[in-house]
Image (spheres, helix red, strand yellow):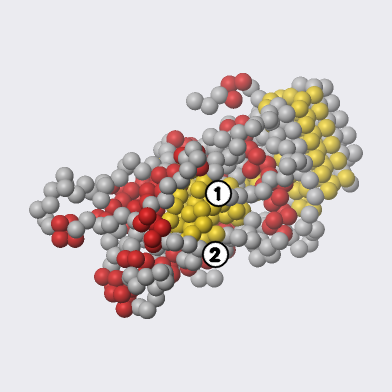
Amino acid sequence: MFPYKEFQAIVLAGGGGSRMTELTHGQHKCLLPIGNVPMVWYPLQLLEHTGFKEAIVVVSENMENNVSLAINKLNLKIKVDIVSVEDAEELGTADSIRLIHEKIYTDFLVISCDLITDVDISEVLNLYRKHNASITALMLPTPKVPDDFVTPGPKNKQKPETDLIGIDNETGRLIFLASGSDFEETINISQTLLKKHPSFTLHSKLMDAHLYIISKWVLDLLMHNKNLTTLKGELLPYIVSKQFSKPPNKQCADDKNTSIVQVDLKEDIYRFAVEKSLDELIRKMSAYNDHSTDLEDAYNGDIIRCYAYIGNGKFGLRANTIQMYHFINTKIFEWWNADNSYQHPYFRSEQSLLMKISPTAIVHSTQIQDCSVDDNALINEKTSLKESHIGPNVLVESKTRVSSSIVMENVTVKQRCAIHNCILCNGCVIEEGTELKDCIVGPQHTVIAGSQHSREVLTDPDKLIEI
């Protein structure tokens, strides 16, 4: 591994989890447990594994202390600089980058805190380097959720949004990016695009992983164009579309007498996308060409160049919905097991990979199968735990069954309860004799004794309202 001094790494962890508010009320999204490890551990571990020595983690002001404490407990070698941004939950991702621009001095990598993947980032970096790109994005196959997989909570027929991603078959050039909802029946492809890229695939089953390698000049553009507020929804489609534009007349652009009315600094991307003289000379002297359809210069003379790296054969998803969050918790150890190069905190040689029990947990039960049990949890005798994650300081009393569930921090499950395929949030109490199936129990909520619930969200009514 080599330290990447040519790139800075930025982890965006300030989001409030607007699509999973049942879980994030009173809890920071980036600290939600996945396999009993805070979500933010996964992108940081990925960066460390790739060779990064430092990373900036962007959080909201009210999260800074909690995130700092959580990261300090993870025994990561990577140096983490936690930068707080006011009201980060309400900002777009591009806005967050813009607000920390003083800390960014070179090309940089941006990764979302909810990306869980085993892709080798160095391959994405190499694709960026190879073509001296403007932006290189990681694309992953859309996760396949089994038909019989049940997401806790009420039934939700809402389908995830489909992205249409056009990628050149030979070079990996990212040439088209749009949301499927923007089109009713037909998609018009420009003649300029077809001429430059006659062989490309328009993908509808790829997922933008929200991992980007970005040139420093793009940040300079962001600083001048405040209308670009998000990376995935606005900045990336804008840069992709501008690949097929032409720079203004060089003489006109260089003329000191040219007025701002004639050349709008916000609109003229070529004020920022300026190719270095040496790079231009190397390109023209090289025999390399990325196309064989004509005798034009490499890249057809395009100064703006976007690429997509497709992580085929790798696992990956974004845990940004309740479905994806629950799904990754059911799969995390199976997926992580398949790649021995990553060291998960619970993978210890002295114990089975499928039996991950903290040395400070007290477990009296002999009926535990495929579970993780975190620090200071107390599992009484005559209990049955199966395919579940038990968080720190959890109490599970006797004659209780817990299966296929996520039990977060400081939860109490009393005697004779049956919990199946549920998410129990921080500090909730499940009273004696309760039966829960496919439910979400909100933080600090108490489920009354002897009650039976199926496919419900159990929490205080005011906690379901997000304003």
Residue at disc 2, secondary structure: helix
Q: In the rendered structure, are the residues bearing label 2 and label 1 in contact, judged by CB atoms less than 8 Å apart?
A: no
Q: Dividing the picture into quarters, in which one does residue 387 lie?
A: top right
Instruction: Find the distance from the CA under tag 2 to the CA under tag 1.
Output: 29 Å
Say which amino acid is labelled 1: Ser
Residue at horizontal 68 percent and vertical 39 percent from the top: 409
**Residue 18 picture location, percent across and down:** 53, 34
Residue at horizontal 44 percent and vertical 64 percent from the top: 128
Residue 80 visible here: no
Residue at horizontal 32 percent and vertical 62 percent from the top: 303
Q: Which residue is mark 2?
A: 50
Q: Observer-nearest residue: 259 or 336? A: 259
Residue 450 visible here: yes
Q: Characterize the local packing of mark 1: few (<14), some (14-19) or many (20 or more) Cα atoms within 10 angstroms.
A: some
Position of 295 with respect to 152 (left or right) is left
**Residue 57 picture location, percent across and down:** 48, 50
**Is 212 placed above or below 293 here?**
above
Residue at disc 1, secondary structure: loop
Q: Characterize the local packing of mark 2: few (<14), some (14-19) or many (20 or more) Cα atoms within 10 angstroms.
A: some
**Residue 379 picture location, percent across and down:** 81, 41
**Is 90 placed above or below 135 here?**
above
Q: Which residue is mark 1?
A: 204
Q: Observer-nearest residue: 225 or 424? A: 225
Say which amino acid is labelled 2: Thr
Position of 87 with respect to 72 (left or right) is left
